[in-house]
Amino acid sequence: MKLLSIAVPCYNSQDYMEKALSSLLPGGEETEILIVDDGSGDRTAQIADEYERRYPGIVRAIHQENGGHGDAVMTGLKNAAGLYFKVLDSDDWMDAEAYPKILDALRSLADDPVDMVVSNYIYDKAGAKHKHVVRYCHALPQNRVFGWEDTKSFRKGQYMLMHSVIYRTRLLRDCGLTLPKHTFYVDELYVYIPLPQVERMYYLDLDLYHYFIGREGQSVQEQVMIRRIDQALLVNRLLISAADPCGVRDERKRRYMLNFLEIVTAVSSVLLIKSGTKENLKKKEALWAFIEKENPRVYKTLRRRLTGRLAHLPGRAGRVIVLGIYKVCQRIYGFN
């Protein structure tokens, strides 16, 4: 069995995928790199095949009809032979210093695997002098196996995303993870759905994942997100339906899951407000109505929190206040 499987979903990635792949090659024979060519129309398929030819036993090229990012992740998971599983988007890369240390830790945990390994990620924003790093050292114990009872409160903007987690492969398969086809922002589902089954964790205060922001047309750019708001809303609804945090026994896990739903719903609400259209303001109301109907307990929790109250401030003045707070958060946390 391999130690770590890394799925690299690729769609028309010829201009940048080799940087991602090169950052993974130092893992050697203990790792497998699963390049999932998601129906690309450029040279992505040829580059994937060339890497498989040059690095047999390490790189595997998988070709499929276009199904979107989530479908490519699921294809990678289906083919994974590693004890642990991670996703690396084709325009991101692993840190050269942190990656070997992460592999050392996974190796030390191989005989008694944990459910989730956490490390830091870097907002590698094009043109930004300061690269914001999301760390978890105030919330998670370092360099030891721990449970939710050992965690502390997460700060705003400090949630665990796809970039920061390595899951045990079997757990991802056993939790019933499915990601919708032709849908952006499914990374939120990927990291959230397994949480009810996550008990044992391990955190390393290492800046492993370089999350590149700034490529033209990138899905996380604000205007692109507004154009694709219906896909973000679909994911938001699926998150509400996927797992009920109110039914989770562990108080700290339950609180973390509720906080995760809160921030996702807040971002959806803000983007709908920011678009400035009457249609999207109606979609905001429809989203909250869905949450109330689907899970009244979650709705009551989210609605009475500050973000829920802000999302419902009435009139133009209320919307101006919300957007002002959002702009401040952008500067502090470096997202979008």
Image (cartoon, helix red, strand yellow):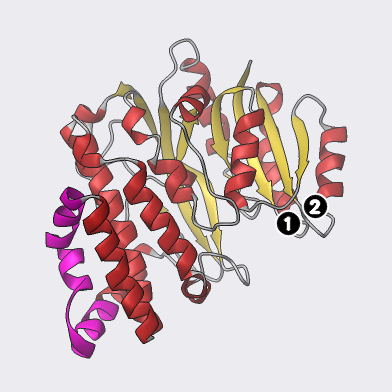
Image point 45% across, 38% down: which residue? 165
Q: In whole angstroms, how far apart are the C-alphas of marks 2 and 1?
A: 6 Å
Query: Where is residue 108 drawn, in percent x and y?
Result: 48, 16
What residue did someone put label 2 on? 44
Q: Which residue lies furthest to the top in this view?
A: 111
Callout 1, which amino acid? Ser
| Label 2 or label 1, whichever comes before in sequence order | 1
User: CB of mark 2 within 8 Å of CB of mark 1?
Assistant: yes
Task: Report the residue marked by disc 1.
Answer: 13
Q: What stretch is highlighted in magenta?
A: 296-324
Q: Which residue lies furthest to the bottom in this view?
A: 316
Q: How crowded is mark 1: few (under 14 residues within 10 Å), some or many (20 or more)?
A: many
Q: What element carries label 2?
A: helix
Q: Is residue 65 above or below residue 253?
A: below
Q: Is residue 167 magenta?
A: no
Residue 95 shows which numbered tag? none
Residue at 50% across, 77% down: 223
Q: Is 219 left or right of 303, judged from the image as shown? A: right
Tell me where residue 133 appears, x and y as whole percent.
41, 53
